[in-house]
Image (cartoon, rainbow, N blue to C red):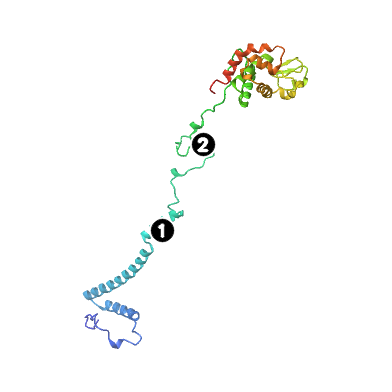
Amino acid sequence: MRDDGTLDDPNAPDDPSGRTADQTSPERSIRPNRLRAARELVAAPGRARMALAAGVVCCLGLATFAQASDETAGVVSRVDPLAARSELAQRAQQGGATRDLDRTPAAQVATPTATPSAAPTGAAADPDTEPDTKRDRRPERRQVDPAPVAGLTRVQMKNAEAIVRTGREMGVPRRGLVIAVATAMQESTLLNYASGVLPESQNYPHQAIGWDHDSVGLFQQRPSSGWGSVRDLMEPEFATRQFLTALEQIPGWQQMPLTDAAQAVQVSAFGWAYAQHEWAATEVVDAIAPTGR
């Protein structure tokens, strides 16, 4: 500003006399220019002072805006939404969890339970996670013993079952099963006999005691005749195998009358007595192993 109160031309070149050789850098000239502008602002009266102040503020604002723009541009370049979204998607594919991705709503959290009954009372069962207890509660099928037939007791019927089951395991034809049951009906009335002559036989499970020499078991087989040991012959399954094995060794036994086939194995003094049990033995076998099974 001049002494007469008029503003200097801001576009006019600076006074060469006021420059030195060290003031060639723009940075060095910024501070003197700002100081001079401030002094001129204080000295300028009225409207000129306001114009000068507005110019200074505008310049300072432009400089601040330029600096802020540079900083904002740096922030934007550092936080690129597309790059951030791409990075999150890549982490999700690789299994990496972020603070947002590792949060699962409580309703979707699968709580491990030791047993199906550990679920809270009143909670709705999830058909995808809860076991189908209704299907698991199906009753197991177990073989039911047939009711006694032909006037037999349950004990007698159970012994007949042992004979039929053993014969089927051996693959003996049905005719052989009927012959075996009829023979046991005649020999022991389908009771597992011990012998009063052989005290050892009474040490094993039995249902009656007989006195016909050393005859034991369902078929009254004698250990002294080579049928087996006392212990083995007291087992209904073993005694049945011994009888059926001997029966199958008789030529043409399947075409023989029942009484003749049984007598060929037993060699009894009353060989004709077996025939009277044929009808009852057939009924028993049919009840235990129905035809077609």
Residue at the limit of the structure toward the bottom, as seen here: 17
Quadrant housing the C terminus: top right
Measuring 29% from the left and 88% from the top, which residue is drawn there?
A: 17
Q: Residues within 10 Å of mark 2 (few under 14, many from 20)?
A: few
Q: Which residue is mark 1?
A: 87
Please state if 157 lies on the left or on the right of 224 as rendered.
Answer: left
Q: Residues within 10 Å of mark 1 (few under 14, many from 20)?
A: few
Q: Is residue 15 above or below residue 120?
A: below
Query: Which numbered circle lies on residue 77?
Result: none
Give the Cα separation between the discs numbered 1 and 2: 41 Å
Measuring 41% from the left and 58% from the top, which residue is drawn there?
A: 87
Q: Estimate the x, y position of residue 32 in percent, counting from the top left.
A: 32, 80
Instruction: Out of 30 and 46, give the one closest to the viewer.
Output: 30
> In this orientation, does residue 98 appear?
no
**Helix, strand, or loop for circle 2?**
helix
Measuring 36% from the left and 61% from the top, which residue is drawn there?
A: 80
Marked residue nearer the N-terminal end (1 or 2):
1
Instruction: Out of 247 and 255, give the one closest to the viewer.
Output: 255
Q: Estimate the x, y position of residue 170 in percent, counting from the top left.
A: 63, 26
**Helix, strand, or loop for circle 1?**
helix
Residue 200 placement: quadrant: top right
Q: Which residue is mark 2?
A: 116
> In this orientation, does residue 232 appear?
yes
Residue at the limit of the structure toward the front, as seen here: 251
Quadrant housing the N terminus: bottom left
Q: Amino acid at mark 2?
A: Pro
Please state if 104 lies on the left or on the right of 202 as rendered.
Answer: left
Q: Amino acid at mark 1?
A: Glu
Residue 82 placement: quadrant: bottom left
Q: Estimate the x, y position of residue 278 in percent, counting from the top left.
A: 61, 13
